[in-house]
Image (tube, rainbow, N blue to C red):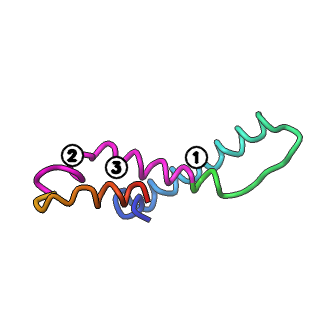
Amino acid sequence: SAVEIAHGSSATAIIFFVSAIGGIILSAIFIPNYISVGASGGVFGLIGACLADMVMHWSLLFGKEIDDAGQGWRHLWMCVW
């Protein structure tokens, strides 16, 4: 994944497991009658880390130095897509 390439395997594993365990705990708190186990919390944690990385480096992705041809909308479309 993009997070693993940018930050390494150990940071990606920490993000995945912390968000997965957090998702399980929050699921147990808000829906105590059901048992849910799955990787969706970890996957959403990785997506959130990727989005946070994009927001923190917004000028690097969408700066005028990168966008010489005026095609910045293509980068934005990739974020939305």
- Image-based side of 57 in relation to 10, left or right: left
Q: Are marks 3 and 1 in contact (CB under 8 Å)?
A: no
Q: Where does residue 51 sit, x and y in percent of width and height?
A: 41, 49
**Quarter of the image that includes the N terminus:** bottom left
Would you call the spot at circle 3 few (<14 residues within 10 Å), some (14-19), or many (20 or more)?
some
Identified by mark 3, the residue type is Met
Numbered range of the magenta stretch: 44-66
Q: Is residue 8 magenta?
A: no
Q: Is residue 31 above or below residue 35?
A: above
Q: Where does residue 28 sit, x and y in percent of width and height?
A: 78, 39
Quarter of image, res 4: bottom left
Q: Residue furthest top?
A: 29
Q: Nearer the viewer, residue 54 or 8?
A: 54
Q: Residue furthest right?
A: 33
- Image mark for residue 54: 3
Would you call the spot at circle 2 few (<14 residues within 10 Å), some (14-19), or many (20 or more)?
few
Name the residue that disc number 2 marks: 59
Q: Is residue 49 magenta?
A: yes
The residue depicted at 29 percent of the width and 61 percent of the height is 74
Query: Going from the N terminus, do you reach mark 3 or mark 2 first?
Result: 3
The residue depicted at 58 percent of the width and 46 percent of the height is 18
Secondary structure under badge 2?
helix
Q: Are marks 2 and 1 in contact (CB under 8 Å)?
A: no
Q: Where does residue 5 sit, x and y in percent of width and height?
A: 36, 64
